[in-house]
Amino acid sequence: MRRIHVGNALSAFGLGFTVPYLYVYVAQVRGLGAVTAGLVLAVFAVAALVVLPFAGRAIVRRGPLPVLLTALVTAAIGALSLGLAGNATAVLLSAAALGAGQAVMQPALATMIVDVSTAETRSRAFATQFFLQNLGLGVGGLIGGHLVDTTRVSSFTLLFAIEAAMFLLLVAVMATVRMPRAPRIGAAPAQSAKGSWKQLLGNRAMVQLCVLGFVLFFACYGQFESGLSAYGVEAAGISTSALGTALAANTAMIVVAQFAVLKFVERRRRSRVIAAVGLIWAVAWVAAGYAGLGHGSQEMATAAFVATYALFGLGEAMLSPTVAPLVADLAPEGMAGQYNSAFALVKQLALAVGPAVGGPMGAALHAPYIVTFLLFSLGITYLALRLGRQLTAVQDQPASVRSRVVAQGNAPAEGPAPARV
């Protein structure tokens, strides 16, 4: 588990070096223009959508570790090629390789966490993963910002080389991991790719969780660097430095609050925790509405806008030990990779649609933008409570079930097997 967490931190650190500066690199440093830079960002999303349906099946059949190593080598090649690419075709092909590798890393690492954790440690394991990802992204972005120079292509080549080196270092770390034996599904006709997807779609709780996940990522993550930032600049008059402060407040809230909220979250029903996040984010959108539509001073508007990002961070800290373990608990034995990949696919869809919808609205339709995403946040609360009716007691609140077993003395030696967690 420690090596997996080191892997999460290294991959996030490498991505933090380049992601914030990708648009500037393609459009200005390489001189390929805004259209090509926009296509590069689109290619990241398209590559993820193409590979994720196959990644889940590969994880189920081969195990998460070989899939992760393949994804890391692919991402390293893409990163290094991107730093050396001098024309639009090379940039787009490199971005496709980097995007595909990066997308597959997520469900592979999540499945590895599932395989080496227990019901008692899973929430904390995913909380630690999220904490290290944000810390790695923040530190990588901070260091990368001091290394780049828009007048020198070589400075960006160095950034992408460092990112590739991080992925290859992670290959070396992960290659030493010895995973426990986990059930794998062979190539029997009954377990075809079509059949596994049919089985997943027949799980009503998982389908409802995917719908809820789409709304979560669409209404929050999909707005961070598109609609909400455009709204802040256009409606609230937020400066670029204040926008950076807001993003820093989001990361700081996650780093500070992650483990503070963990014990609170572990003792509550998961569906109720997600519902509470919807209410917290609704308050965040009200604060954003005040920042851009209120009649206070510029200082008050800036404070409200920074508070919006901080409240989003609090909600994210509550979700990280809740949603990912729930996906794992809904998966039948041996199918965690398929379920993790399906949820990652939903996430990528939301992250692709969110900016496309929120960006224009945030820039031009200020009041409708706030009202729309306020309603989406309240929709999260409704969908979470509705999902709770589909979950078993073990899936919704595993801690309380374990507590009742301990209170009764011990579990029976014989009889029906307990529900899988």
Image (cartoon, rainbow, N blue to C red):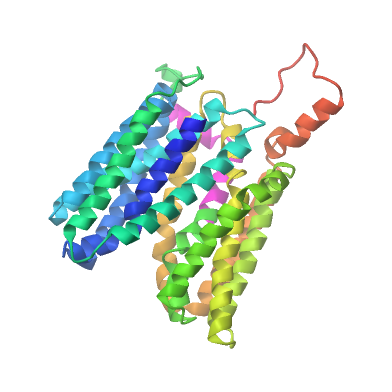
Name the outermost residue toward the right: 408
Indicate the position of residue 169 as horizontal and vertical percent values: 33, 35
Q: Quadrant of the C terminus?
A: top right
Residue at 71% x, 18% y is 417
Indicate the position of residue 141 as horizontal and vertical percent values: 38, 56
In this view, the residue in front, 220 or 53, is 220
In this view, the residue in front, 41 or 214, is 41
Residue 261 in the magenta stretch? The answer is no
> How many marks do you count on the picture?
0
Residue at 20% x, 51% y is 83
Residue at 46% x, 63% y is 224
- Is there any visible trace of residue 198 in the rendered image? no
Indicate the position of residue 86 as horizontal and vertical percent values: 13, 55
Identify the main secondary structure in magenta: helix
Indicate the position of residue 29 as horizontal and vertical percent values: 19, 63
Q: Position of 300 compared to 142: left or right?
A: right
- Is there any visible trace of residue 418 in the rendered image? yes
Residue at 46% x, 31% y is 3
Magenta region: 193-215
Name the outermost residue toward the left: 87
Q: Position of 414 compared to 238: left or right?
A: right
In this view, the residue in front, 34 or 173, is 173
In this view, the residue in front, 236 or 337, is 236
Q: Position of 217 compared to 48: left or right?
A: right
User: Measured along the vertical axis of the image, is residue 378 above or below residue 117?
Assistant: below
User: Measured along the vertical axis of the image, is residue 333 above or below residue 372?
Assistant: above
